[in-house]
Image (tube, grey):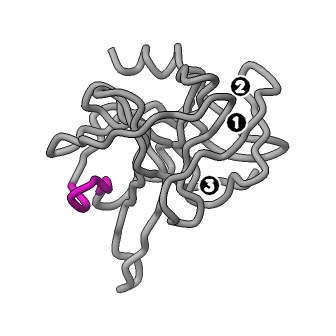
Amino acid sequence: MKWLLCISILCFSANAAAVRIRAQRIEGGNVVTSHGTAYIENGKAITALHVVAEGEITIETDIGWIAASIEKSDKDFDIAILKPRAPVNIHQDIPKGTVILASARSNPVVAMPAEIVGSKSANCAKFDHGCSGAPLFKDGIFIGICTHIGAGVTYVPAVLVRELLK
């Protein structure tokens, strides 16, 4: 399996958004940066744990990068709940259809067409490094958090993500 990293900037309501994230750490005297995408809901950022497991975490907002910390995580589902140190206020509509809001290769967050092919799997031709942690939507409804790719994009269903938020 090929693991991916992601976080970007997009919102669909006052309480939800997708943002770019990164985690930086020192390794052998060099700064190593992991990039990904996170889904913001009710003040929390949800992303793939492998993106933020090590290093100082920051989230991109409309006013720059802000610090965040891991509040909860689940290694089995590769999910982390982050607490930003300041409010993340970004607003944008989510396109109709099935889309993944992601920041491939550290580019700005965009809506990538996708197709759900199973209860935890989707296809997205543009899913790449930096997309891990990206939210999957169908007609504006949050479906899950994308964690990695193999034969397709694996995602953690929204019901499981929201359980971890409790």
Query: Which quadrant is home to the C terminus?
Result: top left
Q: In this rendering, is residue 60 above or below 91?
A: below
| Residue wearing tag 3 | 4
Q: Secondary structure at mark 2?
A: loop
**Camera-nearest residue between 20 and 71:** 20
- Whole-percent x, y for residue 71 in the image: 27, 34
| Residue wearing tag 2 | 120
Q: Is residue 43 magenta?
A: no
Disc 2 crowd rating (10 Å Cα; few below 14, some 14-19, many 20+) is some
**Camera-nearest residue between 22 and 15:** 15
- Residue beneath the point at 55% across and 20% down: 141
- Residue beneath the point at 59% across and 21% down: 157
- Residue beneath the point at 35% across and 69% down: 25
Give the residue type that dot 3 points to.
Leu
| Residue wearing tag 1 | 154
- Whole-percent x, y for residue 137 in the image: 59, 28
- Whole-percent x, y for residue 81 in the image: 36, 34
Give the residue type that dot 2 points to.
Lys
Q: Looking at the image, do the residues carrying marks 1 and 2 touch, with CB atoms under 8 Å apart?
A: yes
Q: Give the extent of the magenta segment.
A: 58-66
Q: Secondary structure at mark 3?
A: loop
**Camera-nearest residue between 137 and 67:** 137
> Label 1, label 2: how many angstroms apart (C-alpha)?
6 Å
> Label 3, label 2: how many angstroms apart (C-alpha)?
16 Å
- Residue beneath the point at 48% across and 49% down: 37
Earlier residue among tags 1 and 2 = 2
